[in-house]
Amino acid sequence: MASYQQMFYCRNCKKNVSLDEKGLCRFCHSSQIKKSWSVRFRIIDTNGEIHKRLTGFNTKKEAEKAYIEFQSNYVPFQPQKTYSLSFKEIFNNYLQTYKFENTESTIYDKKHIFDMYIIPYFKNKDITDISKVDLQNWQNFIWNIKSERTNKKLSWKYLTKIRGHFYNFLEYCRNLYDIPNQLENIKIPKNIDIKKEIIFWELKDFNNFINNLEPNNIIWKTLWFTFMFTGCRFNEIRALTDDDIFNNKISIKYSLSSKKTSNPNSRTATKNHRTFIKQIPDKLQQQIELYKSWKKQNKIPGTFLFGGDTPLPEKTIRNHLIKDIQFANKNLSKDDQLKTITPHGFRHSYVSLLIHLGISTKIIAELIGDREEQVIKTYGHLYSGVKDAAIAMLNDKINQIL
C-alpha cells in the first residue's frame, strides 16, 4: 500500500523541513520554500522487504502516476534457491532432529499422522513451492475426510491435533530454512462437534459394582480399586510395579505406550513428563496388600503390579471391565443399573468425587498429574453444585451477622 506525503524544502537551510503556522521554515523562518510530493511503499530486493520512496513531484497526481509506472515496470527480486529438498526428505530430517527430545510413542504418533494425512497430499513437492493456497486446500481436504472405521468425519479435536503437528513442522522449516510458515495465516474452522457427555460413577455406583463381582476376582477387584481411588491414567497404572505402592502412597513415575512401538512394554515418561508421589485411601492400601500376598503365594513376579513379567494387555483390561459391569448389573435392581464406563471413566469418577468434596482445582490437578487449566476445561461444568453450596454457606453467614 502506497503512502503519499507533501514535503517542504527550504532553500536557505538546504534540507526538508516542517513549516510554522505562518507557512515559514520552522528553523530559519525563511519563506524560500519549495513544495513537493513523495510516495512511500514496500518492495522486495536483495536485502529482503524494504521501504522505497519516490520524491520530487510537483503535485500528488504526478506522484501517483510515478508510483503506478514504477510498479508496472518493477520485477520483484526472487532469491535463488540454495537447496532443493522434497517435503518427505525434510520431514525425515525433522524426525531425526526431534527423536532425541520425544518418547518413542510420540515419534510414532507424529509419523503416523504425517503418513496418513499430510505426506500423501504433498508427496515429493518441494517445500518452498507450497503456497498459502495449497495449505488452505489441504486444510479443507482433511476437514472433510471420513474415518474408514466409523464412516464419520474426524473429530475437531483430532483434526486440530493433525494441524498442530503440521504447524510445528512448518515452524521447524521456518527456523532452519527461512521458509515462511503460511499456515499461521490460515484460520482454524470453528468447532461444531457436539460435546460428549463425561461418563462417570458416583461412590455408590462403585460400591454396587465392587460388591457384585464374580467370586475369586482378586486381580480385577484390586485393579478396579486402583483405577477408582488413584485417578491415574490407564497406562500409568499398567506401568506400576509392586514397589510403587507403599505406606499408603503411590509413586507415579512411568507410563506404557499404547502405540505399536518396537518395545511396547517398556516404561516411558508420563504425560506432561511429571513424576509424583501421593497418598492413597486406606481401603485401597488394604486391598493391594491382600493382592500382593496372593501374588507372593502364587509366585507371580512383581515386575508389573498387574501382570507379572509383562503388564496386563490393554484389550484384556477393557474387555474384562465390560464383562464385570454386565455381571454386576445382573444382580442389581433396575434403579441401580451401572452405566458402562471405560478405564478412563474411573479417572473422571475420581475427579468428580473430589469436586463433590469441595477440593480446589489446583489440588485436584496435583493429585491427577495434570494442569489446573485442563481440569477446569474438562470438569468445569461439574462445579455448579459446589458453587451453589458455597453461595448458600456465604448467604447463611451474612444472615447470621447482618
Image: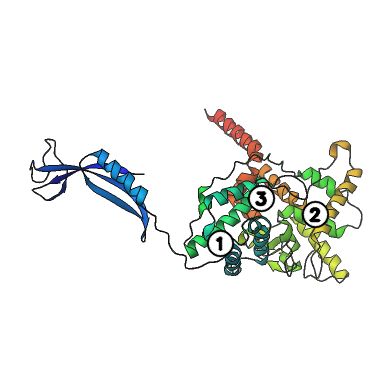
- Label 1 to label 3: alpha-carbon separation: 27 Å
- Residue 389 percent location from the top left of the image: 63, 35
Amino acid type of disc 1? Asp
- Residue at label 1? 126
- Which picture quadrant has residue 338? top right
The picture quadrant where one finds residue 290 is: bottom right
Query: Position of 359 compared to 55: left or right?
Result: right
Mark 1 closeness class: few <14, some 14–19, many ≥20 residues within 10 Å: some
Above/below status of 224 relative to 260: above
- Please report the residue visible at 15 percent of the width from the left and 40 percent of the height from the top: 19
Of marks 1 and 3, which one's residue comes earlier in the chain?
1
Q: Residue at x 29, y 41 (%)?
A: 64
Which comes sooner in the sequence, label 2 or label 1? 1
The disc label shown at residue 158, or none: 3
Disc number placed over residue 224 in the picture, else none: 2
Residue placed most toward the observer, 52 or 400: 52
Can you see residue 297?
yes
